[in-house]
Amino acid sequence: MSFGLAVGCVPGRCVSIVTVALATSLGGLSAQEKRPLDLNDPAWGKIVHYIHVSPPTADRDRMLGMLKTKKDAVLTKANITEDIVKIYEIHRIRASVLVRDVIDNRVELFFVLPPVKQYDRHAFKGMENLTETEARRITGLRPSQRIHEDDAERIRLVIRERYEREGYYFASVETRADEVARMLTFYVDEGPLVHVGNLRFRGNKSFPGSVLLGFGENLEGSAKLESVGGVFNKPFSRWSVEDDVQKLELFYRRNGYLDADVHLEETRFNKDLDEVDLTFRVSEGERYKVTAVELHQMRTANPADKRPPLHDKEDVIKEIQLAAGDYFSSVIINRDRRALERYYGKRGHPTARRYGQRTTSSLFRVLDPQFVFDPVKPELKVIYELIEGAPKFLRLVRIRGNESTEDRVIRRRVKLFPGDLMDVTKLDRSRALLDRTRYFVDPDTLALTRFELSPVEGEDDLVDLDIFVKEGETGQFTWGVGVSSGTGVRGNFEFQKRNFDITKLPSSWNPGTWISEIADGKAFHGADQNLDLLLAPGTEFSYYRISMFDPDVFRQHMDTIGMRVDLYKSIRILDSFNVDRLGGAVTLSRIFDETNRVNLTIRDEKVKLRNIEANAPTIVWESEGKTEIRGLMLSLALSDLDDNLHPREGYHFTTYGELVGGPIGGGQDFYKFGAAAEFYQPIHTDSLDRKHVFYTRLRLDHAEAFGSSPFVYPSERLYMGGSDLRGFDQRHAGPSQFGQPVGGESRLLSTMEYQFPLVSTQMQGTTRHTEIIRGVIFADYGMLGLDFNDSLYREPRLTVGFGIRIQVPVLQVPIQLDLGWPILAQETDREEQLFFSFRRF
């Protein structure tokens, strides 16, 4: 037995190794004449006399041609190693090399090619939860590809790993070869899908394993573990468990337990092997305390730069939350670093990440904090370090990529102007305003707008702003069905075109050209207008509308005046009569910013009361037939919400006053005024970053007839019940006549809710949890009468109850279910405990 040089190869990697080879007789030569080529062989550096390939192959000449080692050339280790690697990569053969000395300092080489097995066909058997297409995709196989015996083991392991990652912990994969048919079959035994049952923790003294509704720090929620048990248990995967061990250690270290150690202590499967209980062992160690916090400010990265800082240290250090005596917390440290970035960002110091791939020497940076540990006690000093750089001013704004959208549409939302100090908070707000329009999105990457700063050559204090956009799809047709206990079943067919331009006509009158240019955004596109066409037929309420809104009708670009035009028809089927309404409205809006505006609206409607039944109130009979309602309304809206669709913090306030008839004309004379305020106050944020919110709403309305009208018209009166006063039937809380609601002219409504998360999931590709089910505990209060001094107005209604809000991800299907129980009610009221609303848009 002797040692020889060979190269071992696995997919993606080949390494030189010393192998053991038996010296055997080959080609009539004795074992003494020929030897394996090892790393210390004296043959290195000699001339290659001849190269043999054994056994001889049909493509011997081609193989010799691809070798780095050549006849009559010097024998080198590098060339031999490369040759063995190349033979494996091309032929999947692990060649070995023998050598024999000949005369005149020459040697003969023998590339020995051991026999290998290759299979012309392959198949998969036993797969139910993995398709053949998926199996080929993850293994890299093609349907007609030959499989080398070395690749078979790799393919088997890849398929088994995929099953294990999906929760099939006991899955096994075997290979069976048919040498005659040259067929290789992969047999899969999937086994049961294993879910995580219970999570147990041992040794955790400082944090509980879990808490009800996520109140307080806990290991399962705060560490954001993947291996979650309970009702919504996840599949068991050892890779997820390994990640969870690291997450637990990271959670402890974030909270000051810098020596914490966690490992999986026990896995206990049930008898059916489809559920496993996991036990983690925690060694917390001691919690480190901060003895001092320091701030070091430097003008530049040059240690020789001793200039005083631009901003007073006492003011800057106020932004730092961590203090001496606190326990170490990387969460607070990261929060402090962001606070320092905000402080300097407001004062014209953008960070390097704002510049894309460009860099400049005078940029602001917050360096990684320095930690000085006590050699004996679990204590440390934290030193924040930052490089101030120079404040920047904006020279110019360049917009790139808007092929159809007008520049003014984008610039209107940019809150920075040439010459302004580069306030980073305004930069972020500008990008958020552009993203909110949903005009620009890359269909391939789903990326939104990108803001990038560029240094100005020779001007250290100036920067240019580049805004990169890509025109997205702004036309949307949606359809669906909705149902609620207040308005019955209703279909919805809606076409919305955002970033519409009514003046940008197609280039020709050819219908085919119209369709293609509209689809490509070359026609009716780019002026920031919105067009909305809605058809919503229903069993109790039908509504049809054409609406268009231009936020800058006079082309002022900034601080604009918008105009909205609405044409609509509605049919409302009530208990004792029907209301048909056909009308239009024009609204002028003074838009101060994206959330605050003043509106002036004029409306003109033809209203008809029909199908009046015998038990209808007297005022309905007196109003039978058709009338005209013409009104002028002034309203104000102020809003500051963190999310317009799913708010968790902020406020929304509206107030209005409307004059109908009188000097404006029409068939009815009355006026209305009112105000409404909504407040969202977060009271707790759980370990999954989900907010518990206290929500309050207060609404006050008053209407009063004058002139020739003896009362406010029935369709314009105020009602309670249903969505605004749960626990009562729609419109059936308040004054009534003949058992039917007659409404009122003065109304007060208020609501208090405690909103809390129940079920959420982490969507693929995101780090935040998306809520699916949210719980609500509420109390609704209302008063309704002919005026504020009416005795009926002093008969309050009060309900308490609870409900849930269900939001199906991706499909965007909101479902509202509320159960309310009247605490204060009148005999004439009609109660209804369940209020529900389901809609699909």
Image (spheres, rainbow, N blue to C red):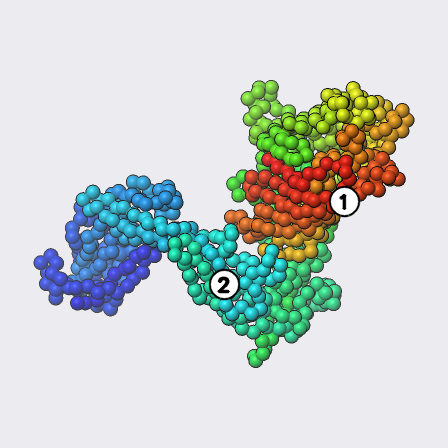
The residue under label 1 is 824
Q: Nearer the viewer, residue 169 or 494?
A: 169
Element carrying mark 2 = strand
> Foreground mark, 1 or 2?
1
Mark yes or no: residue 556 visible. Answer: no
From the viewer's perspective, is residue 213 above or below residue 678?
below
From the viewer's perspective, is residue 186 above or below residue 523?
below
Element carrying mark 1 = strand
Residue 268 screen position, x and y as percent: 42, 61
Q: Is residue 170 left or right of residue 382?
A: left
Write down the quadrant of residue 480 in the picture.
Answer: top right
From the viewer's perspective, is residue 410 above or below residue 152?
above
Residue 167 screen position, x and y as percent: 42, 52
The residue most toward the left is: 28
Q: Quadrant of the C terminus?
A: top right
The residue most toward the bottom is: 376
Residues under numbered marks 1 and 2 in contact, where contact means CB atoms less than 8 Å apart? no
The residue under label 2 is 200
Q: Quadrant of the N terminus?
A: bottom left
Q: Amino acid at mark 1?
A: Leu
Q: Amino acid at mark 2?
A: Arg
> Real-space Cα distance between discs 1 and 2?
48 Å
Residue 698 screen position, x and y as percent: 77, 45
The residue at 73%/26% (across/down) is 576
The residue at 68%/44% (across/down) is 820
Label 2, residues with CA under 10 Å away: few <14, some 14-19, many ≥20: some
Mark yes or no: residue 792 visible. Answer: yes
The residue at 51%/70% (across/down) is 203
Picture disc at residue 787: none
The residue at 52%/41% (across/down) is 444
Residue 476 screen position, x and y as percent: 59, 32
* Marks 1 and 2, the one that precedes in the sequence: 2
